[in-house]
Amino acid sequence: MDLEEAKRSLEERLSMLGVRVSRIESDLRNPGSRDWTDRASEKENEEVLEKLNASERVEIEQIRAALVRIRQGNYGECMQCGDPIAPKRLEVLPYTNTCIECAS
Ligand SMILES: [Zn+2]
């Protein structure tokens, strides 16, 4: 398996997700109403943001963790059983940290 290739596709995906998340964030932080600053509304706003970004945020975390594993040299190893993860699985889910058996 080509680690450089994996790293590149993870980093690409990470920057793409980062752009998307920050776009959603700036949309939400720009509600067009300046009076809308009491604490309750702010909190509501944060919750909306969190929900909207939940799946993106999870994926970002997973990608960051995968990049750490590349640096540590244990990328492509199942974190649960220690077996190598099938390259085909890594192609589809480059940030995965479990083999197909442990994931199912
Ligand atoms: Zn496993």
Image (cartoon, rainbow, N blue to C red):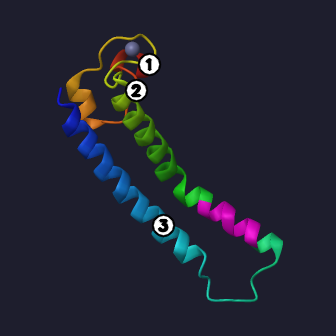
> Measured along the vertical axis of the image, is residue 27 above or below residue 44?
below
Q: Is residue 47 left or right of residue 55?
A: right
Determine if residue 83 is in view: yes
Mark 1 neighbour density, 10 Å: few (under 14) some (14–19) many (20 or more) = some
Task: Say if disc 1 is inside 8 Å of ligand 1.
Answer: yes
In this picture, residue 23 sits left or right of residue 54: left
Identify the amino acid type marked 1.
Met
Q: Secondary structure at mark 1?
A: loop
In the rendered view, tell whether residue 16 sits above or below residue 55.
Answer: below
Residue where numbered disc 2 is placed:
97
Give above or below for 88 relative to 57.
Answer: above
Q: Looking at the image, which is closer to me, 14 or 87?
A: 14
Q: Residue 79 bears which disc, if any?
A: 1
The numbered mark, 1 or 2, whose residue comes first in the sequence reads 1
Q: Ligand 1 near label 2 (Cβ, under 8 Å)?
A: no
Magenta span includes 12? no
Lower sequence index among marks 2 and 3: 3
| Amino acid under disc 3 | Ser
Real-space Cα distance between discs 2 and 3? 26 Å
Mark 3, residue position: 22
Q: Position of residue 1 (x, y in %)?
A: 18, 26
Kindly indicate the quadrant of the structure image that contains residue 32.
bottom right
Disc 2 residue type (three-letter): Asn
User: Mark 3 near mark 1, Cβ–Cβ under 8 Å?
Assistant: no
Which residue is drawn at the image coordinates 44% and 18% (left, top)? 79
Q: Which quadrant would residue 49 be assigned to in this image?
A: bottom right
Residue 104 shows in this picture:
no
Q: What whole-number distance in Å separates the C-alpha atoms at marks 1 and 2?
A: 6 Å
Mark 2 lies on a secondary structure that is loop
